Amino acid sequence: MKMNEETCIEELLNGLNMGMIAIDHLLDKIENEKLREIVIHQRKNYGDLKNKVHQTYPHAEDKTKRKFMLESMIEMKTLLTDDAKIAKMLTEGSNQSVMTMTHLLNREQDIDQTLKSYCDDFEDISKKYIEELKEFL
């Protein structure tokens, strides 16, 4: 595997893991049932994509960067929160994921088409849920 592919896989898995961790920490704080369903579907789509990545690249290292910092930040920001703040946090996280993946794909020219497809899927999932979360901002 080429170095740039390793970087892409690592960033893709990191983005998926961070999204799933955030959702896991926020799910029990969501009051609106429709918002909860959207977030559950987003979590499932991220998990399904992560499984595809692992099946295609079984030797990929799967570690979440800054996991403790992310968990601490989420807990601190949600001490006194409501669904609008949760939707905003999830939207901001999804936007960051899209920007990171776009930047990485623009920088890395020679990556496997399957991997590029997974990165595109991650962007598409994130963009879809950004649109769905707007209603709750």
Image (cartoon, rainbow, N blue to C red):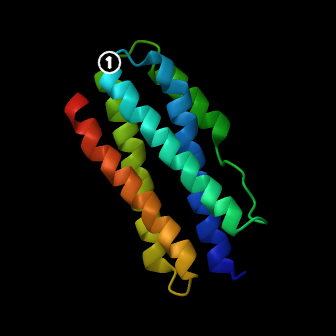
Q: Position of residue 46 (x, y in %)?
A: 52, 48
| Above or below, 30 relative to 124 | above
Crowding at dot 1, Cα within 10 Å, few <14 / some 14-19 / many 20+, comes out as few
- Left or right? Give the position of 51 relative to 32: right
Q: What element carries label 1?
A: loop
Q: Position of residue 39 (x, y in %)?
A: 41, 33
Could one spot residue 59 in this view of the protein?
yes
Instruction: Report the residue at 64% width, 43% height from top.
Output: 66
Instruction: Report the residue at 60% width, 54% height from top.
Output: 50
Which quadrant of the figure contains the C terminus? top left
Q: Where is residue 101 in the image (x, y as percent from the top left)?
A: 46, 64
Instruction: Report the residue at 37% width, 59% height from top.
Output: 124
The residue type indicated by label 1 comes to: Asn
List the residue tagged with mark 1: 32
Based on the displayed image, in which of its 4 quarters is residue 30 positioned? top left
Nearer to us in this view, 115 or 75 = 115
Could one spot residue 100 in this view of the protein?
no
Nearer to us in this view, 96 or 132 = 132
Q: Position of residue 56 (x, y in %)?
A: 67, 68
Instruction: Report the residue at 73% width, 80% height from top.
Output: 1
